Image (spheres, rainbow, N blue to C red):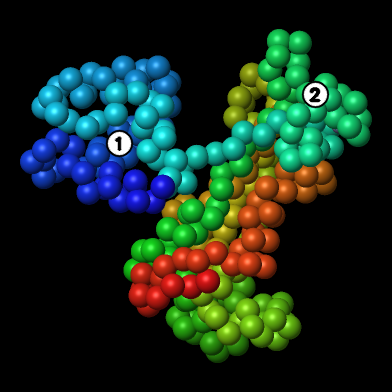
Amino acid sequence: MHDRLKDDAALPLWPGCKKASKLSAVLTLYNLKVGHQVSDVFFTEMLTAVSELLPDDNVLPRRTYEAKQMLKSIGLVHERIHACPNNCILYRKEYATFDECPKCGLKRYKTNNSPSKVMWYFPVLPGLRRLYASVEDAKNLTWHHDGRTKDGMLRHPADSPQWKTFDDTYKDFENEPRNLRLALSTDGMNPHRLQSSSHSTWPVILMIYNLAPWLCMKRKYMMMSILISGPIQPGNDIDVYLAPLVEDLKLLCEEGIEVYDAHKKTSLG
Ligand SMILES: [Zn+2]
């Protein structure tokens, strides 16, 4: 998949084009689509119109579906998972084919066949991999170890006793400063404002405490990993929704994933 991405990044938008590759053109246009929240149908029409204005042998995708397929390998995709409205289970794995909740018996679908409750999972591993692939970001990820002032003052979680206790307990983890220290944060918001006072959406944001304080709260470095939508707030049942994220983080923690560190020019497992 990554080979295909490399090919698309190297392929000029049309033979001889110096300004844009197939990948850069799709990313520019897709950013506009997302920024202005235009529909897939509109985007397909726009792609067709733009490619008709370009030289005949251009390689710009003509359909939204093709553009999305290209972007899939960068990790700009999400999983849409149905959930029980009472927050008992997610319809995945052993429950993937169920039509009603095995715990409370509520139906998975409403009478109009739409799911009763939905969550979205945005896989975090591709994003973390990308950080290490950038020379600047890979260097930033070791700030907690080699960039901060260590004078006993509290400026960052790395200065806290809890951080030190963790390091003392898990020496192997501490010995590799590039290992990730992550934090999760969530809160409810109502995207429909006054139209529906009972509706709430819960984004779950992942933050990276390896980074300096002036970077770790920047939007670029915060990852929205989960979005839970529905009339009932998840409250303490939020663990149910965290399952896909926890599985990825466990993989990271227990087995590790191989990434390329562009700063130190080595692979890190
Ligand atoms: Zn249930």
Q: Position of residue 105 (x, y in %)?
A: 90, 26
Residue sitting at the far left: 16
- Mark number, residue 244: none
- Looking at the image, residue 197 sits to the left or right of residue 131; the answer is right
| Observer-nearest of 217 and 238 | 238
What residue type is disc 2 on? Asp
Q: Which residue is disc 2 drawn over?
A: 99
Report the Cα–Cα distance between label 1 and label 2: 38 Å
Residue sitting at the far bottom: 151
- Looking at the image, residue 49 sits to the left or right of residue 179; the answer is left
Quadrant of picture, ligand 1 = top right
Q: Position of residue 96 (x, y in %)?
A: 74, 33
The reply to whether residue 189 is visible in this rendering is no
Q: Quadrant of residue 237?
A: top right
Neighbor class of circle 1 (other Cα within 10 Å; few <14, some 14-19, many 20+) is many
| Observer-nearest of 12 and 219 | 12
Residue at the spot 63% in from the left edge and 79% down from the top edge: 173
Residue at the spot 51% in from the left edge and 62% down from the top edge: 216
Q: Which residue is disc 1 drawn over?
A: 26
Check contact, mark 1 vs mark 2: CB within 8 A.
no
Seen in the picture, residue 61 relative to 166 is either above or below; the reply is above
Q: Position of residue 208 (x, y in %)?
A: 55, 63
Question: Which comes before the other along the chain, label 1 or label 2?
Answer: 1
Camera-near label (1 vs 2) is 2
Q: Quadrant of residue 90?
A: top right
Seen in the picture, residue 68 relative to 207 is either above or below; the reply is above
Seen in the picture, residue 19 relative to 229 is either above or below; the reply is below
Q: Quadrant of residue 200?
A: top right
Residue at the spot 55% in from the left edge and 39% down from the top edge: 78
Seen in the picture, residue 135 relative to 198 is either above or below; the reply is below
Residue at the spot 17% in from the left edge and 42% down from the top edge: 12
- Looking at the image, residue 178 sits to the left or right of residue 28; the answer is right
